[in-house]
Image (cartoon, helix red, strand yellow):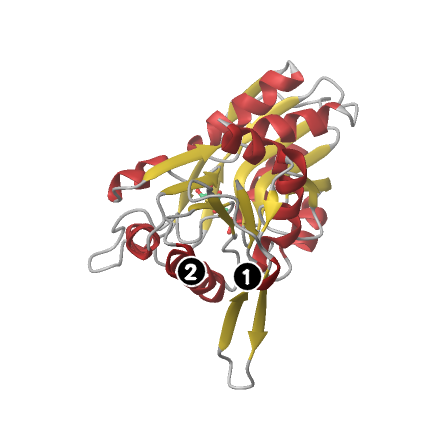
């Protein structure tokens, strides 16, 4: 395999290549003053080992989503051109995956559009991490694999010495994530009920009757974007008498002041992975991606 590090996932791609001991095809991104750019693969220093060699592009699509997505499409297209092959694409954070259906009349199903663009450009397989809803894979005639970072998150949390912990997802959709983390920690898990207005984005998390008094709590979600969801969950568990509260997620988008808001709500720390590189990316998904590629 040849790993191709996209500009948005350079360090993650190099970690994957190191684990697998694979060759790397580097590329250079040159920006122009008008906002346009060009991708140039380092073909001069790359020797192909054979026609059967697999190319693996690693490119995440965190904000700015449009730019990172377009770079991905251009990379796929150019690789097909240069080597006459269909690459596998690893998109650790798949942007727009939350827009998985038409919630309001006339809306775009953006996840469907994005997947089809990836397919149309020539990718033969997509690997992604904790995609918001795996059902979107049915929108496209491409081999899609979703891997989870939750075991890695659980393993990391094991090291911080939690007291009588419980893992809680802030909504029902993320309960499988809470379960996976709780299994590694050997503790209970539960979930809150959340409602979000499709028009205003306003979030309401219901208290329920989860027993958190005197326990450390981990609030786990797939994505922390504005932080609104996790802030509500953290406030509730604090008001119910939780000891230390930690927030963990796969994709820490941390839009605007999300980090500060979560800490101010009462969280001790926030943990995330390197699907999106940010101040909370302390857990790497490189091992799970490498393992999936090996298979
Ligand atoms: C939605 O269902 C997701 O699982 C997350 O809960 C959501 O994307 C988090 O967004 P925010 O941080 O803006 O509340």
Q: Left or right of 277: which side holds 194?
A: left
Residue 209 seen in the figure = no
- Residue 131 lies, with reference to residue 202, above or below; the image says above
**Inter-mark Cα distance, 2 to 1:** 9 Å
Judging depth in this view, the residue of 69 and 241 nearest the camera is 69
Of 144 and 176, the residue lying toward us: 144
Secondary structure of residue under mark 2: helix
Please tell me which of labels 2 and 1 falls first in the chain.
1
Residue 217, by quadrant, is: top right
Find residue 43 and name its label: 1
Q: Is residue 104 left or right of residue 284?
A: left
Q: Position of residue 30 (x, y in %)?
A: 57, 74
Q: Residue at x 55, y 35 (%)?
A: 289
Vertical arrangement, residue 251 with respect to residue 151, above or below: below
* SS assignment at label 1: helix
Residue 128 spot, x, y in % from top left: 46, 41
Numbered label attached to residue 178: none
Q: In the drawing, does residue 106 fall left or right of residue 228? A: left
Circles 2 and 1 in contact, beta carbons < 8 Å: yes
Residue 14 versus residue 165: which sits nearer the camera? 14
Question: Picture coordinates of residue 105 (x, y %)?
Answer: 20, 57
* Residue 46 position within the rendered picture, expressed as x and y whole percent measured from the top left: 58, 55
Up the image or down, 56 lies above or below 25; here it is above
Residue drawn 59% across the image and 24% down it: 181
Q: Which residue is mark 2?
A: 82
Camera-side residue of 140 and 104: 140
From where the camera sits, is residue 127 visible?
Answer: yes
Q: Residue at x 66, y 18 (%)?
A: 185
Residue at far left of view:
105
Circle 1 packing at 10 Å, graded few (<14), some (14-19), many (20+), is few
């Amino acid at each position: 395999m040849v790993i191709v590090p996209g500009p948005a996932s350079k360090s993650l791609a190099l970690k994957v290549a190191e684990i697998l001991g694979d060759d790397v095809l580097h590329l250079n991104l040159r920006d122009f003053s008008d906002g346009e750019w060009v991708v140039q693969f380092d073909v001069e220093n790359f020797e192909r080992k054979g026609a059967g060699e697999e190319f693996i592009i690693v490119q995440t699509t965190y904000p700015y989503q449009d730019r990172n997505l377009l770079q991905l499409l251009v990379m796929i297209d150019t690789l097909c051109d240069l080597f006459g092959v269909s690459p596998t694409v690893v998109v650790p954070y798949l942007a727009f995956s939350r827009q998985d259906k038409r919630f309001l009349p006339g809306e775009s199903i953006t996840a469907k559009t994005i997947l089809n663009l990836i397919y149309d450009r020539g990718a033969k397989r997509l690997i992604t991490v904790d995609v918001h809803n795996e059902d979107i894979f049915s929108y496209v005639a491409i081999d899609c694999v979703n891997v989870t970072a939750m075991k890695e998150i659980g393993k990391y949390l094991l090291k911080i010495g939690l007291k009588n912990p419980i893992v809680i997802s802030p909504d029902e959709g993320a309960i499988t994530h809470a379960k996976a983390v709780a299994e590694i920690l050997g503790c209970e898990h539960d979930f809150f009920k959340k409602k979000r207005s499709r028009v205003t984005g306003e979030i309401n998390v219901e208290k329920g009757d989860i027993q958190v008094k005197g326990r450390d709590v981990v609030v786990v979600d797939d994505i922390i974007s504005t932080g609104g969801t996790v802030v509500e969950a953290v406030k509730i568990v604090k008001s119910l008498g939780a000891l230390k509260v930690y927030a963990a997620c796969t994709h820490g988008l941390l839009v605007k002041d999300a980090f500060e808001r979560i800490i101010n709500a009462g969280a001790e720390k926030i943990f995330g992975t390197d699907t999106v590189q940010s101040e909370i990316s302390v857990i790497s998904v490189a091992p799970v991606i490498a393992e999936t590629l090996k298979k």
